[in-house]
């Protein structure tokens, strides 16, 4: 390691609504839930990431509060976002030299972000200690992470379904030709499941339990070749107020999240309708690429394929596709410089 590298560190960050991933030295060094637990009496941070996640719904609201600084893919709590970024950088151990390094960061952001929201990301990273911050749009990062040559004169459609937003974009020649960013994604699915359980089973469940149901038996179509086993779900009975366990099958989750999936399908169709004809011809040949945690919903690829009549490909390790692409863009900074804001 040379003297220069001691004082200049580069990290890539996927600052997601549900999870945040940090890449340093081409390795994923942090993959933690985007949650901060704060002591309301002292204002001090009690925990971040997984340690804070286990406190969700189980804390004494008078003392400890769990906060998700990002909502819908953007910063909702500026101060907590600073703490989250600072703790992620600290946990990544990028400052093990005798003097604090100058940090260059590339952070991915939703394509539909406003200038005010974009500025909040930049200021949060600056306050957390980064000296140079660049931003890259999530669909572009996802495409790079999937392995697509985004610089070629060929059209590719990316659908990145994360925790807070579904990002749909058509990419060609290193640019986003047309895009659609809607705030219907993993968090919305969880809310759908909570509401379904309350209405259909008279049982109240929390956000974490809904997430577990989605992971265990989540699906987008009602006919699966290899259906998952029923998931034992614990909650509170609305009628008696007592703890209760019920079995949930995947078809119930399909019903619960159907309207949200339909809205994502419509956003994809709207984006295809706005795509220039030459690029539409390319997409007909290459198909649609799915990334993000939403891509793991069983049968989502076949449902979108049936709706669009296009081939649909699920990225390898879709949860980390955006982070992987952000890391590649950072590593090949000169090649991708014009893609990074």
Image (cartoon, grey):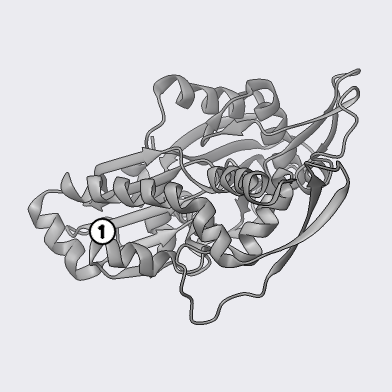
Q: Where does residue 177 sit, x and y in percent of width and height?
A: 21, 44
- Label 1 secondary element: strand
Q: What is the quadrant of the C terminus in the image?
A: top left
* Outermost residue to the bottom: 225
Q: Residue at x 46, y 26 (%)?
A: 118
Q: Where does residue 9 sit, x and y in percent of width and height?
A: 62, 44
In the displayed structure, 260 sits above or below 125; it is below
Q: Where does residue 124 sit, x and y in percent of width and height?
A: 60, 26
Q: How many marks?
A: 1
Residue placed under numbered mark 1 in the picture: 156
Q: Which of 41/173 is in front?
A: 41
Q: Is residue 194 left or right of residue 283?
A: right
Q: Which of 236/311 is in front?
A: 236
Q: Is residue 208 left or right of residue 46?
A: left
Q: Where does residue 105 sit, x and y in percent of width and height?
A: 55, 39
Crowd tier of the residue under label 1, counting other residues whose Cα lies within 10 Å: few below 14, some 14–19, many 20 or above: many
Q: What is the quadrant of the N terminus in the image?
A: bottom right
Q: Residue at x 61, y 37 (%)?
A: 103
Q: Is residue 311 left or right of residue 313?
A: left
Residue 87 visible to the viewer = yes
Q: Which of 95/88 is in front?
A: 88
Q: Residue at x 37, y 57 (%)?
A: 143
């Amino acid at each position: 390691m040379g003297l220069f590298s001691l004082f200049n560190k580069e990290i890539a960050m996927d600052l997601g609504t549900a999870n945040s991933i940090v890449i340093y030295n081409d390795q994923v060094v942090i993959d933690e839930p985007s949650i901060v637990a704060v002591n309301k009496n002292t204002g001090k941070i009690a925990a971040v990431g997984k340690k804070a996640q286990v406190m969700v719904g189980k804390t004494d609201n008078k003392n400890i509060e769990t906060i998700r600084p990002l909502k819908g893919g953007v910063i909702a709590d500026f101060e907590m976002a600073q703490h989250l970024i600072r703790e992620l950088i600290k946990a990544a151990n990028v400052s093990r030299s005798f003097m604090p390094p100058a940090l260059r960061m590339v952070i991915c952001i939703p394509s539909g972000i406003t200038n005010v929201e974009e500025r909040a990301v930049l200021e949060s990273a600056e306050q957390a200690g980064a000296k140079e911050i660049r931003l890259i749009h999530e669909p572009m990062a996802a495409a790079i992470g999937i392995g697509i040559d985004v610089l070629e004169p060929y059209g590719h459609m990316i659908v990145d379904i994360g925790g807070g937003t579904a990002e749909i974009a058509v990419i060609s020649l290193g640019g986003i030709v047309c895009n659609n960013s809607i705030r219907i994604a993993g968090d919305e699915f969880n809310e759908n499941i909570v509401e379904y359980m309350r209405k259909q089973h008279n049982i109240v469940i929390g956000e974490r339990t809904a997430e577990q149901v989605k992971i265990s038996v989540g699906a987008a179509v009602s006919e699966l070749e290899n259906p998952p086993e029923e998931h034992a779900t614990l909650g509170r009975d609305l009628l008696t107020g007592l703890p209760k366990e019920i079995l949930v099958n995947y078809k119930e989750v399909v019903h619960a999240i159907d309207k949200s999936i339909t809205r994502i399908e419509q956003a994809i169709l709207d984006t295809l309708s706005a795509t220039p004809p030459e690029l539409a011809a390319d997409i007909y040949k290459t198909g649609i690429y799915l990334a993000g945690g939403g891509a793991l919903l069983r049968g989502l690829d076949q449902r979108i394929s049936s709706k669009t009549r296009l081939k649909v490909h699920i990225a390898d390790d879709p949860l980390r596709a955006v982070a992987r692409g952000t890391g590649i863009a950072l590593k090949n900074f000169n090649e991708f410089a014009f893609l990074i804001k």
